[in-house]
Structures are given as structure tokens and as C-alpha cells.
Amino acid sequence: MDLSEKAKELVQKQIGEWDLVGRNYEGLRNVKVKTFDFGDFNIDIQYNPERIVSSVAKVDDQSIEDRSCFLCRVNLPSVQRWIPYGIDYVILVNPFPIFPEHLTIANVNHTNQRIFDNFETMLDLAVNLSKYVIYYNGPKCGASAPDHLHFQAGYKGFIPIEHDFSSEICCREVRTIDGVKVSHWPEYQRGIITLTSNNKSDLIAVFNKIYHQLLVTKHDEPEPMMNIIASFDRKSWTVHIFPRTEHRPRQFFESGENQIVLSPASVDMGGLLVTPREEDFLKITEEDVIDIFEQVCFDTQSVLNLINKL
Ligand SMILES: [Zn+2]
């Protein structure tokens, strides 16, 4: 049995034996979704009340220090099972799903969420969990455990960017660096750098160049702010990198009518925005979506400038 099938089996098993998981995966079947049509692409909005915990998670140093880490093995509920992955990771079912199969791949040690030395692990996961897309949220870009290294995985074909990638209107190849194709998304409302290659070490080398370019924009964050979505198909990786400027948009901190509780992470960057409150799901507009992306993402020109400096 390959790892994707083992993971699928793990989800099914946990749905049957863990009440919270059973309830939340059942709830996901009736989840409300609405779609905004931006012409060349769509954005989906998912009303998902169970995600409130993650969306409003306090990730400042003091709050993190004061809580017990939900990814450390000693704190996992006794009903939680895992599949070992290599010697450093375990594959867990995410009890608060966005996808019909939603995994968390957590390091076995309580070590900080950082991508630089762990990008290769992400690429390997994309190969080994071949039916899944792998997600990375930076410590101030949607990760609710910034102190415990982890990735997420969701079944392929669920978020808009996956099919928009094959549209030449949305995504254009602009350069080839060391054999790695580099593309950008000129009219997609958020700055994205997409890398495609069938060579892992070339891909890591180009990613490292991007990381070092982004270091210039880092202020007091632990690493350049970014989300990453990676997948592996037909012997080649596709990696979407979303450089970030803000953790949360202005609307998150507003009160009353003006508030929209939306804390963008990689799934949102990929075109599936998750609103845990029904009122936000109902009132959010296309203009809000553009405004939120403008606040938290690089614009497309800045991304193009960055690509040209590589
Ligand atoms: Zn931990």
C-alpha cells in the first residue's frame, strides 16, 4: 500500500473512532461554499465554523509560551493515531478539516516552524503523498503552531490554483534558471512565483535564491514571510511561493460590522478563502477579497522584479 492510501485509511479509521473527527468531517460535507468569478479565474469562499480555533489563534511569543503545544506527542489525544514518516515526522489526521482528507505532517520534536532547511522535506512529501498537495504556512503566515515544525496536506484537485496553473492566461513562464522554469501570475490579484522542475537539487537551489532575495524584506520576523504549495505530477514538481507582507488584514482587527475574521494561510492563497463566521461568509465581497490580498501579499510587479534579480 502506498503512503497516500495509508493516509486515506488513517482518515477513515479516525472518522470512525474519534467523535470530534467524525463530527467535523461529516460537517464538511454540508459546508457552504460560494464562488466569485473574476473573469479568468474564480475564488471560492468556504464557511467553516470549526476553523475558528485556527483563524483566531494567538501566535505572539507569550501566548505560545503559555499554551501546551497541540502537535507534541505527549499532548495528542489518546485516540489520535499516526503513521511514522521517516525518522523525524508523523502523519496525523487534522481534526479541523478544510479538505475531505486533511493531514498534518508534524516533526517528532518540538522545533520551530522554519522552511529554509526543510524545503527538501516538503518536496519529498509531495512525491510520497502523491495524491495530495502539500502546504507550508510560515510562522507568521497562518501557522497556528509557529513553534512546532509541520506541513499540511489536502487531496489534489480541491483549490483553484491547481487548475488555474494550466491556464496560460493566468500563469506565464518568464525565465528558466538552472533548468527550473519560473512563472508568475500577472492578473491573479496576488504575487506568486511558481517553480517547475524534475530535478530536486536544482529546485532547492532556486528556492534558496528566492529565500535570500526575500530576506531583504524581513523585519523582525523569524524568516521571510511566505506560504508555499507544492505537488508532484508526471515526475515533476510544481511549487507555488506566495511572499507575504502582513500576517492578517486590517479587517481582522476591526470590530462590529467592519470585522471580517479571515486569517490568510496557504489554502487561502491558493484561492479557497476560509471564513469561520457565517456573517463574514455572507457579507464578504469581491472587493474585500482584492483588498485583503493587496494587504497581505506582494503585488505582481514586486514579484516580477524579484524574479528578474534571481
Ligand atoms: Zn510541540
Image: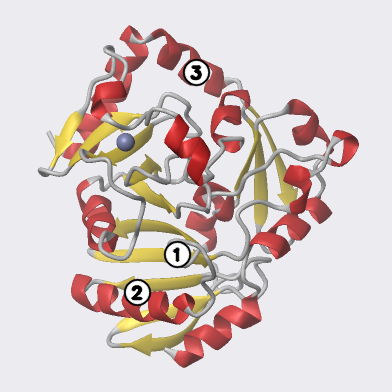
Residue at coordinates 36% horizontally, 65% vertically from top-left?
238
Q: CA distance from mark 3 to mark 2?
A: 36 Å
Viewer-side label of 3, 2: 2
Does residue 216 appear left or right of residue 121 in this picture?
A: right
Q: CA distance from mark 1 to mark 3?
A: 29 Å
Asked which secondary structure carries label 1, the reply is strand
Q: Position of residue 95 (x, y in %)?
A: 42, 24
- Residue 104: image quadrant is top left
Image quarter for ligand 1 equals top left
Q: Which residue is mark 1?
A: 240
Q: CA distance from mark 2 to mark 1?
A: 11 Å
- Name the N-terminal-most of marks 2 and 1: 2
Q: Position of residue 72 (x, y in %)?
A: 28, 31
Residue at coordinates 31% horizontally, 65% vertically from top-left?
116
Using the rendered image of the protein, determine whether residue 103 is visible from the camera's viewpoint: yes
Asked which secondary structure carries label 2, the reply is helix
Residue 207 - label: 2
Q: Amino acid at mark 2?
A: Phe
Q: Amino acid at mark 1?
A: His
Viewer-side label of 2, 1: 2
The correct choice, above or below, for 107 with respect to 224 in the image is above
Question: Label 3 crowding class (10 Å Cα cut-off): few <14, some 14-19, many 20+?
Answer: many
